[in-house]
Image (tube, rainbow, N blue to C red):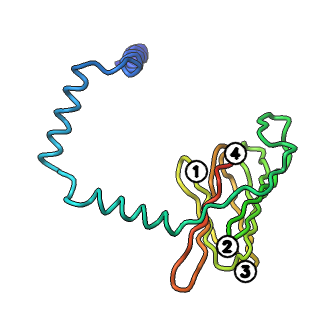
Amino acid sequence: MNGSDDDRQTEVEESLAAEDLDPSDFALLNSLRAYYDERDPVPYGLLERIQFEITLDALHTEVATLTQLDMATAGTRSAATETVRTITFSSDSLTTMVTLAPQGDGTVRVDGWAAPGAGIRVEVLLPDGPRNTYADEDGRFVFEGVPCGLAKFALYVPRDAEFSTVLSPAIEL
């Protein structure tokens, strides 16, 4: 195939992908499901075990509330807005402040402080997957080159032999 044939093939595929599913599509999908149900079924009890684990995790998670937002630039998205924003969220056991500094490459540097903060593992939860770091003894943590968009922070706070989880509300980076 030459370049123009590849382009036509791509156009045909994109056109087909944009169409609604028809009865033949559903028949094909149902036959694939039947095949996998027979040849590689979901292990007995797996769904129930997953739901149980998710419920247990949810019971051990505190949801932080947004307590302060630098309103000067909140919700703005323009090239002219290259200022640093500060966001604070807190839960019963933890207060966290993050400063978001736009970088020249279209990403954001996140400087954060958690109190109390020693030994906390911090994740920034992004659509393309989480990024991890640890807070130092003063509760400070940094993420470099974080893509702009919606994100949450998960902080894993050491408690005896386990960790409790604090989850921030979604914020726009």
Q: Of callouts 1 and 3, which one flags the residue occurring earlier in the amino acid sequence?
A: 1
- Tell which circle, 2 or 4, labels the residue nearer the N-terminal end: 2
Mark 3 or 4, nearer chain start: 3
- 148 and 158: which one is in front? 158
Q: Tell which circle, 1 or 4, labels the residue nearer the N-terminal end.
A: 1
For the residues bearing labels 3 and 4, Cβ distance under 8 angstroms: no
Amino acid bearing label 1:
Leu
Instruction: Give x and y (percent) for residue 38.
Output: 12, 46
- Which residue lies at the image location 29% right of the left edge and 59% below the top edge? 48
**Pointer 1: what residue?**
126
Give the residue at mark 2: 93
Q: CA distance from mark 1 to mark 4?
A: 11 Å
CB-based contact (under 8 Å), mark 3 and mark 2: no
Position of the N terminus by quadrant: top left
Distance in Å between CA atoms under marks 1 and 3 = 25 Å
Please state which of the two labelled residues, at mark 3 or mark 4, is closer to the viewer.
4
Which residue position is annotated with label 3? 137
Instruction: Check disc 2 and give the amino acid type.
Output: Ser
> Which residue is more in the foreground, 10 or 150?
150
120 relative position to 95: left or right: left
Q: Which mark is residue 165?
A: none
Q: Quadrant of residue 99?
A: bottom right
Q: Disc 4 marks which residue? A: 172
